Amino acid sequence: MKFTASLVTKSILAIGIAASVVACNQNKTADKPAAASSTPATAASTTGDKPEIVYFNQDSVVSQYNYIKDMDKRLEAKGKAAQSDVGSRQQAIQREIADYQKNAATMSADQRAATEQRLQRKGQEFQQYQQNAGAAVQNDQMNEQTKLYEKLSDFVKTYAKEHGYKLVLTYKKGDPTMMYGDPSLDITADVVKGLNDAYAKDKK
C-alpha cells in the first residue's frame, strides 16, 4: 500500500482555495468577478495608471515557491517512512505464516488451532495498524495543506493591501475561469519573490 500522494496536485488545489479568499483593500469589489476578470484593463483604468485588479499564475507559484517544495519533501519522507514500517510488519507476519505452513504437519491439532488463532489475530491487528498509518499520513497532508492555505491567504491579503489592489485573481493551465489577462497586470514574478523572501526569513 502506498501512502505517498500527488502532492503537487494537492498544492495546486490549496492555492486555488487561497485564491478564492484573496482580499481587497478593505473594499469588497468582487460581487461581479466574471465582468472584472474578462476586462481587467478596463477595471484597471478606473484609477489611472494604478490597476486595482491583478492576477498571478498559480502553476508558477506551485513550481517556484520554496515552501511548497519543502512541504512536499516532508510529506514524501513521512509517507515513505510509514510505507516502510507497514511493509516490515507485513513481512514479519508473512514469515510467521510461512513457518506455520512449513511445520503444520508436525504439530498437534491443538497446536495448529492455537497458532492459526494467533496468526488470525495478528492479521487483524496488522490491518488495523495499516489503516491507522494511512490515516496518520492523510492527516499530516491535511495539516500541511492548512498551513499552506494560511500562508498564501495571509500573504496575498497583505500584498493586496500594500499595493492598493482590490482584487487578485489567479489562473492555471486548463482552467477556463480566466481566459485572458493583460500582461501588464501579471504579478506572478513579484508574488513568487515575495513568498520566497518571506519564507526565507521564517526559516532563519
Image (cartoon, grey):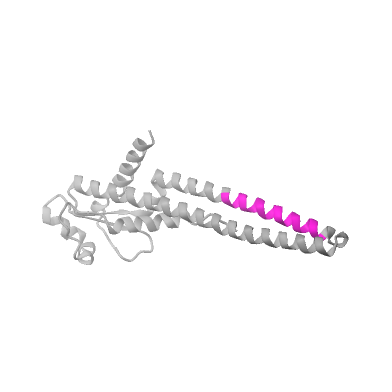
Q: Nearer the viewer, residue 167 or 175?
A: 167
Q: Is residue 61 visible?
A: no
The C terminus lies in quadrant: top left
Q: Would you identify the image quadrant in which residue 96 lies?
A: bottom right
Residue drawn at 70 percent across, 54 percent down: 91
Q: Is residue 136 visible?
A: yes
Q: Nearer the viewer, residue 79 or 199?
A: 79
Q: Where are the magenta residues, as a range?
A: 82-101
Outermost residue toward the right in this view: 106
Residue 42: percent from left, percent from top? 16, 60
Residue 71: percent from left, percent from top? 44, 47
Q: Nearer the viewer, residue 37 or 120?
A: 120
Residue drawn at 62 percent across, 53 percent down: 86
Outermost residue toward the top in this view: 204
Q: Is residue 183 left or right of residue 12?
A: left
Q: Would you identify the image quadrant in which residue 129 lies?
A: bottom right
> How many numbered markers are drawn?
0
Q: Main secondary structure of the magenta part?
A: helix
- Residue 83 lies in the magenta-colored region: yes
The N terminus lies in quadrant: bottom right
Residue 100: percent from left, percent from top? 79, 58
Residue 51: percent from left, percent from top? 17, 52
- Residue 174 lies in the magenta-colored region: no
